[in-house]
Every structure is written in C-alpha cells, then in structure tokens.
Amino acid sequence: MFVYIYGEGCFSERFSCEQRYHTKKTFLLSVWIFFPGCDSDVRCRNDSGAPVDWYILYKYPHKAKQPGSGLKYLYMDDRTNGWILSSKIINESGALANTLKPLLDFYTKHFGYILYNDQPPKPCPASSSHGHSKGVVMLDTQTGVWLSHSTPKFPAYRNRNFWPNNGNRNAQTFLCVTFPHATFRDIGKQLKYIHVYPFDYYIPTDFPKELGCLTKQGCYPTTSPWFRIATLTSNAGRKFYSFAKYSRF
C-alpha cells in the first residue's frame, strides 16, 4: 500500500504563458510528419528499460569534494526486494530517462502529457496560487504514468537534456506508478484539488476531460468538500491511496 499526500496554496490563479499551447501544437504537427507510424508504450521503466508497475527513486544530495555525488541514486520496485544502489546516473540514463522516453521521443498523436511544477523551468513562472506540487503525467490509449517528484524545474522545458542542474545539490525523490488509461479520470480530479501548475502539456480531445480541465484557467474546486480521497488501482492491480486538498480545506 502506498499513500500520496498533497497540499495547495492560496486561492487565486494566474497563467503566464498563454501562447504555449499554440507553439506546442505546431511542434507536434511537425513531429508527426517525421514519425507517422509509431506507437508509444507509456509505463514506468527500470534502469534496464523493462516495464515495472511502480518504482521509488531517491537521489543522493551532492557532497563536497565528491564529483558526481549529486547524480547517484537508490532505486526500489516490487522486484528488487528493497533498496539497491543504481549503477546509472540520474541525468543521462536509467529509470527516469527510460520512463520519460515517450515524452523525449514525442512521435504519436495517441499520446498526451502534463508537466506540472510550482517551480517550473523558464519561461513560465508559476504564481503562488498553485499547489506546492511537482509531477509528470503521460499516457497513451492503453496505459499511463503518474510520476510524482520533488525536483524544481524538472523536467527541463522541451529539451532532451531533461535533468536541471539545480537538481544536483539537494536530495530528491520520485514515485512512479503505471495506471490503466481509464484511471486518469480520477488522477485528473486529484490534480484539480491540488491545483497544479501545468507549465507544458498536450492532451488529445478524446482523452479524459478531467486532464483537459487542468490545462485551462479556473480548474480548481469551487464548492465543498475541499478535499478528495481516491483509491487508485495500478496496472498490475495494486491499490494506491491518494489524498488531495485545496486551499480552503
């Protein structure tokens, strides 16, 4: 059993990057021309690239006089029988890079994503009205990933070098879970209560409308209750309990 706990900030909303959708739409159309026949396979993936139902990653903080120490990490999934020290480094290869591959190799119209972060990369600063929350949502027509994390400015804005240098100094954590496509209706509702700041996104119109709501202004609770509890079932049938609250809670 795993538990998500999220909070939200002040009760107001401002978006600073109104043109981002139109730019992204142009980018997507050009990419589809180059890769018209590919299908994404959106799942959490381990250091070897094999799909896993979930994983937890703990990145070590940087230590003085130890070059590269801020890029090493511990890794755990349901097959490792506890924590293991990864032989990879977080900014080049390994579980994060393998999981984010559908985003970094964006090549199919049957793919959607939301990158949210209350400390986003340039050029889209978030207002203080949004929840203190960071994560990546990616999905195709079959499965998807909810990757919750603690790293400011992650992932880098439309850049294959996804790891921000500011992430090296402090310890960081990542929780990745693979869910069926239909579960993202509930995930979208949870993110609405958190009032996430989506600094980059593309959600096809036939994907869950609860995710589409997050890309628009005014997507936050307007009536009580000001919290929501959900039981989310992973692709392998494991139960995850998600607790989300809005600022009026």
Image (cartoon, rainbow, N blue to C red):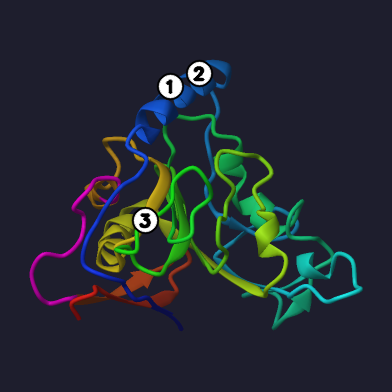
Q: Check disc 2: other Cα within 10 Å, few if <14, some if 14-19, many if 20+.
A: few
Query: What residue sits right under mark 3 in the picture?
Result: 197
Regarding mark 1 in the picture, which secondary structure is present there? helix
Q: Check disc 1: other Cα within 10 Å, few if <14, some if 14-19, many if 20+.
A: few
Q: Position of residue 63 (x, y in %)?
A: 82, 76
Query: What residue sits right under mark 2 in the picture?
Result: 30
For image coordinates 56% across by 38% down, the residue present is 158
Q: Amino acid at mark 3?
A: Tyr
For image coordinates 26% across by 70% down, the residue present is 10
- Of labels 3 and 1, the one closer to you: 3
CA distance separating discs 1 and 2: 6 Å
Q: Amino acid at mark 2?
A: Ser
CA distance separating discs 3 and 1: 22 Å
Mark 1 touches mark 2? (CB < 8 Å): yes
In the image, taking residue 164 as reference, residue 191 lies left or right, namely left
Regarding mark 3 in the picture, which secondary structure is present there? loop
Magenta region: which residues? Answer: 214-226
Can residue 27 be spotted in the picture? yes
For image coordinates 42% across by 67% down, the residue present is 133
In the image, taking residue 174 as reference, residue 215 lies left or right, namely left
- Of labels 1 and 2, the one closer to you: 1
- Can you name the residue that lies furthest to the left here? 223
Q: Position of residue 31 (x, y in %)?
A: 53, 22
